[in-house]
Image (cartoon, rainbow, N blue to C red):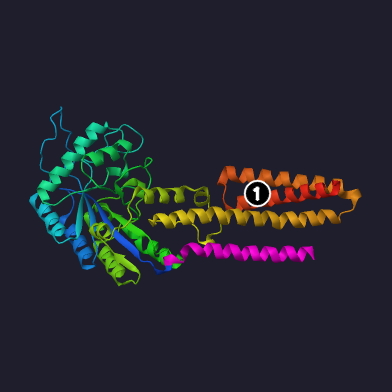
Amino acid sequence: MRINMLGANFKSRTALMLVLCLAPWDQALSAELKVLLRYDDFSHASNPVLEQRLFDAARKGGGGVLVGVIPFPGEGYPEGDTGMPMLMPKLPSNKIDLLKQFANNGTIAIAAHGFNHRDNVPTAENSEFAGLPEALQVKLLGMARNSLETAVGTEVISFIPPYNQYDAATLSALEDAGFGLLSAGLHGPAINSSLAFLPGGPYPYRIRQIIDSAIANGHLDAIIVSTIHPYDISESGAELPSFRNNKGQISIQQIENVIAWLQAQPDIRLVSVAELIREKEDLSADRLNANRRLRKSIISRQRLLPKALNLYPLDGLYYPADRANSMYAWQITVATIFYLLIAAAVAFPAHRLLSLIPDRHERRSMQMATGLSMLGLAAVVFKSMFSGFYLSSATILASLLGLVAGMAGHRWLHSS
């Protein structure tokens, strides 16, 4: 009778856990996936023909492109304390005309992509701004912004840091220099800022895969920012950087095809930066911090829950703050229930089995169970050292804890 009751309780808890796992996605089923293109390294050296085709494709698809323009590629920093001299960006007239054309029709939003895009900091990671004095950052950012606004005749409020690297001083400098939006990577210093944040995402060759995964899992209430560089386009003639391992170049025609495919999909919308701002999309630091916490959680990093429970953040998706916070909370709740159930599923049978063993064999049985627990613990430690602590290791550990709990419960009841 007791075993039957335990079995019924196990089933009811399992059903409850499955219901809990589905709960975070009820609202997502009626949402839409928003896709924004980000194009970095627009400069005097990039190919204007390919860029025109990219911008045209975005315009025809009803979306937009956040264009990271390098104002002074390769130039040195202005010397001396001369205030903020007005310089024209190092762009030929045809490139400036291209920016004007698509800025005026609302297709592109122009972002300053650094000052000169040099690696100016002697650290292991490439960076132009991180590590520079804040006063110098304010000066460089102000000059970059003013030069682009003067040349193109449109407001520039966005900044894309070269190499996606920035520091806390950069955040303060951006506000002082009149910027309102930062598009970098998802990682960076602790954020407490009034800036808007729109982290870059997957390279263009992965966007179909990312979207298919989002649709299959019902993760539709998110933003995807597909980050494109000139070297991503095969016709540019540029080689992929070494960290890309020669993987991911596609043709401009393939990019145009992807944009056309996106336009035809239900529940997916190509958007521009202006649309996101106009629709009051939450781009706050709270949203960025919530996404960071979700992706850095031990459950996400170590994959401590079965994939079928659908509680992991998907690659390339930037979730709303409430969704990211909800997923994080459900991760903790479901993981607690999941591993307690595993421990209970071992503890009760272990206790029951030990109670059936005659007293004369009890000590030997307890020694064997203890030895088995120690052997299992050693196996978990060994496995974790060489291949990491993931779902299988956590499951074994929970089972061992259940065995120990069953032994302890048996000993306590037997001695009372």
**Depth order, front residue of 352/127:** 352
**Residue 24 drawn at (x, y percent):** 48, 62
Q: Is residue 391 left or right of residue 38?
A: right
Within the magenta stretch, is there residue 168? no
The image quadrant that residue 179 belongs to is top left
Q: Decide: few, some or many residues near mark 1? Use Cα within 10 Å; few <14, some 14-19, many ≥20.
A: many
Question: Which quarter of the rendering shows the N terminus?
Answer: bottom right
Q: Is residue 137 left or right of residue 266?
A: left
Q: Residue furthest left?
A: 93
Please give the range of residues in magenta. Answer: 1-28
Which is nearer the eye, 69 or 85? 85
> Can residue 225 be seen in this snapshot?
yes
The answer to whether 51 is drawn above or below residue 88 in the figure is below
Q: Main secondary structure of the magenta part?
A: helix
Eyeballing the image, is 416 above or below 138?
A: below
Residue furthest toward the top? Answer: 80
| Residue that carries the numbered disc 1 in the rendered image | 397
Q: Position of residue 235 (x, y in %)?
A: 23, 58
At 12% from the left and 55% from the top, the residue drawn is 100
Image vertical order of residue 238 relative to residue 173, above or below: below
**Residue nearer the viewer, 326 or 38:** 326
Whether residue 314 appears in this view of the structure is: no
> In the structure shown, which secondary structural element does the residue marked by tag 1 occupy?
helix
Question: Left or right: 369 with respect to 177?
Answer: right
The kind of residue on which mark 1 rests is: Leu
Q: In which quarter of the view is residue 213 placed? A: bottom left
Q: Is residue 22 magenta?
A: yes
Q: Residue at x 73, y 50 (%)?
A: 403
Q: Position of residue 272 (x, y in %)?
A: 25, 60
